[in-house]
Amino acid sequence: MDYSETAQRISRKFSQKNQTVDVLKIEGKLRRLVDEFGVLPSEAERSVTNELLKEFNLPVVTSSGGSGPGGATEQKKIADAIPGDWVTIEARVVSLSTPASAAIAQSGILADESGEIRFVVWAKANAPAMAEGLWYRIESAVVDEYRGIPSLKVHSGTTIKELGTANPLIPVPAQVIDLHTGVGSVRAKVVQEWDVTHERMLQQGLLADETGTIKFVLWKEPGKERLEIGSVYSIFYALVDEYNSRLSLNLSTATLMQEEGDMPTISGGDVAIRGAIVHIAPGSGIIKRCPVEGCNRALSRQNYCPIHEIQPKFVYDLRIKGWLDDGEKTHNILLQRDVVESLTKIPLDAAVQIAENNPLGMDEVFLRMRDALLGRYVICRGREIDNRLLVNSCERLTFESGEHSALLNRAGGAS
Amino acid sequence: MSMNAREVGKKDAPFEREPARRVFAAELRECRYQFKEGEEEKSPTFVLLPTGERSNRIYLVGTLTEKQRQGEQNLFYRGRVVDPTGTFFVMAGSYQPEAMQQIAKIETPAFVAVVGKPNLYQKDPASSPLVSVRIESINVVDKETRDLWVLDTAARTLDRIDAHAKGEGKDIEKAKEQYPTLDPAVFKKMAYEALAQIRI
């Protein structure tokens, strides 16, 4: 095993605090801990780091007494704090969220004039509870990284003092394209709503402005309400995460302000795509939707809505999800009921009859629609956002003899 | 949507489904070279078309003239799908249960649309490689769909021949290297003959 990378990392940490350490010596210590004593590499790194912190008389995270502000702690603006720093900051608690674990007493977002940062107060820190909206002086906290995102950790060596200031701090909403992992504020429009994929999820969908689109997620928590599709919101202090190399906005911590009026979004123009339907995805055909006002989610086979649970008085609907392929690119398509009816010539009431009277039930509708559409040439018109084409109209292509003769000329022309 | 600063340094691009290329049987038959992009086990495999484009998936429409059930433990179907230029060899095994069910109930002859993955294989080391298409889906269609496919495939083939002549495209050089004796002009003639077979 190679320890040089870990040793370098430890060395960097100390050089940021103006201390020089012997990398080879660290490497030797790590090797000894892991190879001879079977210590986990992460634990070895921690143990070597703590040993050095003690050596330089710097505060150690795990020590219970709390060594107070160490010599290397600097007062910083949030924007200047980088992972590995021991810092003292003066900041406002702009958001508190429900801690994800019992080991955490408080979590949320701190902000000053320069920027925002996520923070965590360990339960072991025995720190006084901070209140949303107030300013605090936080002495000797540690900036580290969680999933590549900086986060301020309040531990037992940190002291927290409330400041009397009442500077309200109003962040300027950014554009979607400028968001980056961490914390962000943005003004955007809700352009799509997707089925929720987790029972604790309240809503997910897509936000857009003129510069781009971003996925958003809202978790079920007291006081949280669903966003209205088509509305514009100013969103302050949302968590910006990254999954599968795409950014996503978690609105749990955010303050949301619904705004009057409309705003232009990136996909403005309609597109028309000619191609072959090369796949009809599961979940196409006849589906059941949740009847609760404003919900309309697709129900599972057991009539289970992820939010409203069992709904025996479901509403039937038709939809097709699939892939439309023009030979150069494959487009994810979504067809709503009216488009499905006109394309398949199976109206909803006929589909309900099939589903309720056929031994295969709803699968029979899927199979009939698949056999009617798969492998066929169509032209779909609609709006394409984030690689998904929301189809407004779709029709079968027909043979054009003009196109035929033009191609004959082209193929025969130069030979 | 344009690429922007935050995309820089990203390891994985967001998922993009490989497009289904349009290719006549007579061109697919000439394929001798396949390659993998990337090192991972699930990296896609591409068959290089002689006109200079990679294909991980193809979409074809033709007449299913024969189908054959084979194997005992590992049941699979083989079929022949004929277009105006030649024959595609298609197959569906137990890893494609949906495709197997679909082909099982089709009565030959019938116009079919097939989406599938082309693969090169050799019967024995001495023979030249053959191309077969592993079916993802197969579905009975009408004659008009077949005719539309011939138009579409002729247009795409001519586009590839033009790009080949201009040297535009990332796989053209590779194609010239791998198929030094193939003149793309033969595929232009092939496209013409395919178009000429459609009665107006």
Image (spheres, coloured by chain):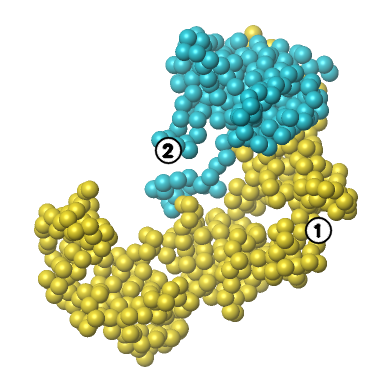
Q: Is residue A96 above or below residue B168?
A: below
Q: Label 1: chain?
A: A
Residue A340 in sight from this viewpoint: no
Q: Is residue A202 above or below residue A197?
A: below
Marks 2 and 1 share the same chain: no
Chain A, hue in figure? yellow
Left or right relative to B82: residue A124: left
The image quadrant of residue A29 is bottom left
**At x 28% / y 84%, what residue is drawn?**
A159
Name the one closer to the observer, A375 or A408: A375
What's the residue type where badge 2 is placed?
Answer: Glu
Residue B177 is situated, as x and y percent measured from the top left of the image, at: 44, 16
The image quadrant of residue B61 is top right
Residue B40's tag is: 2
Chain B, hue in figure? cyan
Q: Label 2: chain?
A: B
Residue B46 in sight from this viewpoint: yes
What's the residue type where badge 1 is placed?
Answer: Tyr
Residue A316's tag is: 1
Q: Is residue A363 above or below residue A170?
A: above
Mark 2 is surrounded, within 10 Å at the Cα level, by few (under 14), some (14 to 19) or many (20 or more) other residues, namely: few
Residue A267 is situated, as x and y percent measured from the top left of the image, at: 63, 52
Name the one closer to the observer, A128 or A333: A128
Q: Is residue B126 above or below residue A162?
A: above
**At x 52% / y 72%, what residue is drawn?**
A252
**At x 56% / y 64%, what residue is drawn?**
A217
